[in-house]
Image: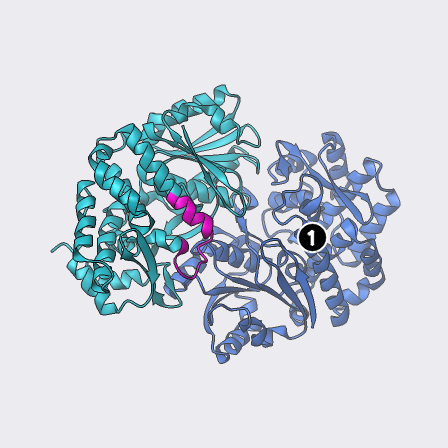
Chain colours: A blue, B cyan
Amino acid sequence: MRRLNVELADRGYEILIGCDLINRPELITAELPTPRVALVTNATVAPLYGDAMQSGLQASGVGVTTIVLPDGEAYKTWESLNLIFDALLAARCDRTTTIIALGGGVVGDLAGFAAATYQRGIPFIQIPTTLLSQVDSSVGGKTGINHPRGKNMVGAFWQPRLVLADIGTLQTLPARELSAGMAEVIKYGLIRDLPFLEWLEANMEGLMARDGELLALAVERSCANKAAVVAADEYETAKEGGRALLNLGHTFGHAIETGMGYGEWLHGEAVAAGMVMAAELSRRLGWIAQADVERITSLLRRANLPVSGAPLGPARYLELMSHDKKVVGGRLRLVLLKRLGEAVTYAESPAEEIAAAIEACCLA
Amino acid sequence: MRRLNVELADRGYEILIGCDLINRPELITAELPTPRVALVTNATVAPLYGDAMQSGLQASGVGVTTIVLPDGEAYKTWESLNLIFDALLAARCDRTTTIIALGGGVVGDLAGFAAATYQRGIPFIQIPTTLLSQVDSSVGGKTGINHPRGKNMVGAFWQPRLVLADIGTLQTLPARELSAGMAEVIKYGLIRDLPFLEWLEANMEGLMARDGELLALAVERSCANKAAVVAADEYETAKEGGRALLNLGHTFGHAIETGMGYGEWLHGEAVAAGMVMAAELSRRLGWIAQADVERITSLLRRANLPVSGAPLGPARYLELMSHDKKVVGGRLRLVLLKRLGEAVTYAESPAEEIAAAIEACCLA
């Protein structure tokens, strides 16, 4: 089992990475203020891991209220959040109850936002069961729900007390979701870790074949990169760089997700296409070479990821991107690549260059 | 104008107390990161003060989106919160937009929770226009909404950047609401400030006649007491005492409010009756004398406040109280009086003594 510390001003926590962690309730009980948890999961994950976890915790003397949500980004809504509140109140959960999120990013974001706001905040543990949530959404404390007018528009920062990344759960993950998670893994190499990018180029086939040791290494290195960024800028208040760098490809990607309707593209797929757009714009600004863009698209393709965006047209992209949270004081601040392994935030891109980069990277 | 500093670990802020502060937009503009605000108010306050405020801010070069909610505790719901989110998104408010709450506690709690959760948190300014919100809800950072199963069950801690307590707005306050606010003012004397309690006994008639100078003094002293308590225990994590002491009468009071349906009793009215119950229980535990209880009921009566609870029956009270957030690990932790001017948290009250105290203080 690998251990990684996330150092935060307010309160640090540990990420444990390894196989079969889900069947070790003692890792969880060590973190509970009282032996009482609400286990939030979804209809897909519950039969795979939820029932076993509930039994294991109960056998350790923990009272468990299990809350099963419908599966999918379309359910990352107030209605699902309210299902959690209803269940917590019906079970008379108090401020010492710990919420455990068992599932992917949607479950983590919903359960985390419930933990942030139930009785103004209760303890929270993350058990991410997808590659995407293991390397991205389970580190950093972002929680929230979608709004009909935009993704993640309502939420809070709320840090978990513990993250268990059980690599074994990745064996049951649909192939498309494995790829989507790999987009965020590749992102860490692109924004701040060239040696990791090179390691990924050397090992992508093994990773896609779900070699457990390689996956554990990739998750640990990704989390270490994310944790370092988050520790330096917990509330995303840095004017330049900082946590915003984690959004490489995300502003373009959110436009694809919103424009196509949530769920049509997976988040990681949209981010992959968005990273190509960001790379293309960086090339047009003279920062990286055509060969660098091709190196990125090649690696994404080997992870079975899309390297072109949905054909919404540049005008619609720009319209959707202007709604993004990364707009600060009316300026569109994008994350771009100074070189491979070094991202920057940049608010001076000419609109016509952004449009041209989108056009160049859209499906015909 | 009086100034009071609220010292907090994370970030302190100022409370400004005086007359006609609402017509001094420069007090607000000094705190804005960008000249863009969302002014959240209600249908009662908007015609009295909202329009003038909007004009004043606009004349100072500030872009204003005004959001008018229906008035009343019954509207402290997710639906009202969503009206705020809809308006913020329609107006393309970004993370630098400041939410201003202009109104009583309901507006403050709703607007504050919107500020805490819109795009994971944006700046917030409180302009409380009721006595209750000036002395209580605008200090301390508690925000939230009600749930059908309980009051304030969903919320967050979110500190304002500035509080403007304009004493002039108290001249238009309905008499019943002035009294309700006075319940919380008296509470500060009871829990930690005997000299203030004596000052209130000497000046209650002048306060109820809305003498501006007396009201300003009472608001300042109340806020100073609350600020001192909050500063020592920002997130209500103290095991004993701390912020919980501010809840004198509140656990009993919440039972009245919930049992009678929100809005039947005003919060301050329920707290007044609840404080009498807490005093009666303290007497039964041998901590204070019958004469102390009578001194409390006498002062509350002079503020035109109820000193008996709604006739729900002790069993129903206990049932409702067991849902309260002040339940920790299954034990009902009440705030009681060791003596006048000194409150304590106490989890060892025998259930039959609690029931007897309720019985003794209920309307026939």
Residue at the disc numbered 1: A269
Q: Decide which of A281, B7 is in the foreground and name it.
A: B7
Q: How many marks?
A: 1
**Residue in the image at 67% along x and 33% along y:** A315
Left or right: B246 as drawn, with respect to B60? left
Query: On what subunit does the disc labeled 1 rest?
Result: A
Q: Is residue B130 visible?
A: no
Figure quadrant of the N terminus of chain A: bottom right
Locate residue A210, reporting x and y percent: 74, 69
Q: Quadrant of the C terminus of chain A?
A: top right
Per the image, is B233 magenta? yes
Q: Which residues are magenta?
A: B225-242
Point out residue A164 in the picture as x, y percentages from the top left corner: 62, 67
In terms of depth relative to the viewer, which is nearer, B123 or A83?
Answer: B123
**How far from the left and from the top, in percent, is residue B45?**
34, 31
- Badge 1 element: helix
The structure residue drawn at horizontal position 72% and vertical position 31%, both measured from the top left corner, is A351
Q: Is there any visible trace of residue A203 in the rendered image?
A: yes
Give above or below for B264 relative to A94: above
- Residue A257 sits inside the magenta stretch: no
> Hey, what amino acid is under mark 1?
Glu
Q: What x and y, as percent, mark residue B194?
A: 29, 47
Q: In the visual, does A217 lie left or right of A122?
A: right
Identify the residue at image location x=67%, y=74%.
A19
Tell me where residue B170 sits by quadrant: top left
Residue that lies at the very extreme toward the front in this rendered image = B195
Q: Nearer the viewer, residue B112 or A175?
A: B112
Q: For label 1, count other residues whose C-alpha is less than 10 Å away and answer few (under 14), some (14-19) or many (20+).
A: many
Q: Nearer the viewer, residue A319 or B229?
A: B229
